[in-house]
Amino acid sequence: MSMPMYASAEQVMRDKTDYARKGIARGRSVIVMSCEEGVLLIAENPSSTLHKVGEVYDRIGFAAVGRYNEFENLRQAGIRYADTRGFSYDRRDVTGRGLANAYAQTLGTIFSEALKPYEVEICVAEVGADIATDQLYRLTFDGSVVDEPGFVAMGGQSDAVTASVREGYAEAMPIGDAIRLAVHALANSAPDGQVREVPSRNLEAAVLERGKVGRSFRRFSAEYLDDLLGNGKSDAPEPGGSAAEPSE
């Protein structure tokens, strides 16, 4: 009679952690950053249809790296959570902290009980009345939550991106400067240390606009980013920008 295979709980958790980290490391980086006009969400994303940043509710945005179908499921679940809570109570009762707690429970349960963990890392961002009240929550594949001040960088080269952003980040910087800083950090995050070119068509960017009544999420067009990064004439949010995407 053959002996059944045995692995300790510690070994199983280590294997799951290594598996999830390898999957996340293949993803291109995302940066979420507080700035003067609101909260900037920017990602290196060649696809024009598969979004890595999106809207969840009035003042709440979502950014993610990793396996697309898994973090898209999480985003849609977050929208259902927010819509239900806002309908049952009040729209002001839907907060980034509450949504982050819900995601933490979901990711923690999947990590501990399912055979395969989610290969995702996500950020829940809520824009406040001022920079001091902005909330950026970073959630990892095992359900851990970290409240990050100022900015969050995620993805395969997150350490290099974080170091680059930290060098240039200043509180209350204009959104144009924030976009240029984020693109500079993405371009300097190559594993071989070389500076890459990150064309505007490969960028996905949006902002949670500060002080706006109702839905605050708005995407930037590639033309605006190209103009901003090409000649740096404008520091203001894109005038007459495209309308926010509808909630699902």
Image (cartoon, rainbow, N blue to C red):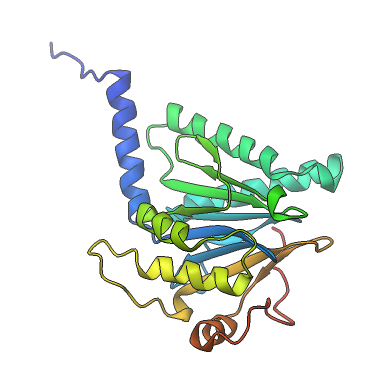
Query: What number of labels is visible?
Result: 0
In what quadrant of the picture does the N terminus appear? top left
54 vs 243, left or right, is left
Question: Where is 138 relative to 48, above or below?
Answer: above
Q: How far from the left and from the top, in percent, is residue 114? A: 43, 31
Q: How far from the left and from the top, in percent, is residue 228? A: 56, 83
Closest to the observer: 226 or 67? 226
Answer with the quarter of the image where residue 131 lies. Answer: bottom right
Answer with the quarter of the image where residue 85 lies. Answer: top right
Question: Where is 80 relative to 210, above or below?
Answer: above
Closest to the observer: 50 or 91? 91
Query: Which residue is drawn at the image coordinates 51% and 82% (left, top)?
Result: 229
Closest to the observer: 3 or 217? 217
Query: Which residue is drawn at the image coordinates 52% and 61% (left, top)?
Result: 169
In what quadrant of the picture does the C terminus appear? bottom right
Closest to the observer: 191 or 25? 191
Query: Which residue is drawn at the image coordinates 52% and 85% (left, top)?
Result: 226
Q: How far from the left and from the top, in percent, is residue 143? A: 50, 35
10 vs 140, left or right, is left
Residue reaching furthest to the top: 1
Query: Which residue is drawn at the image coordinates 55% and 58% (left, top)?
Result: 32
Question: Where is 17 relative to 37, above or below?
Answer: above
Q: How far from the left and from the top, in percent, is residue 50? A: 51, 66
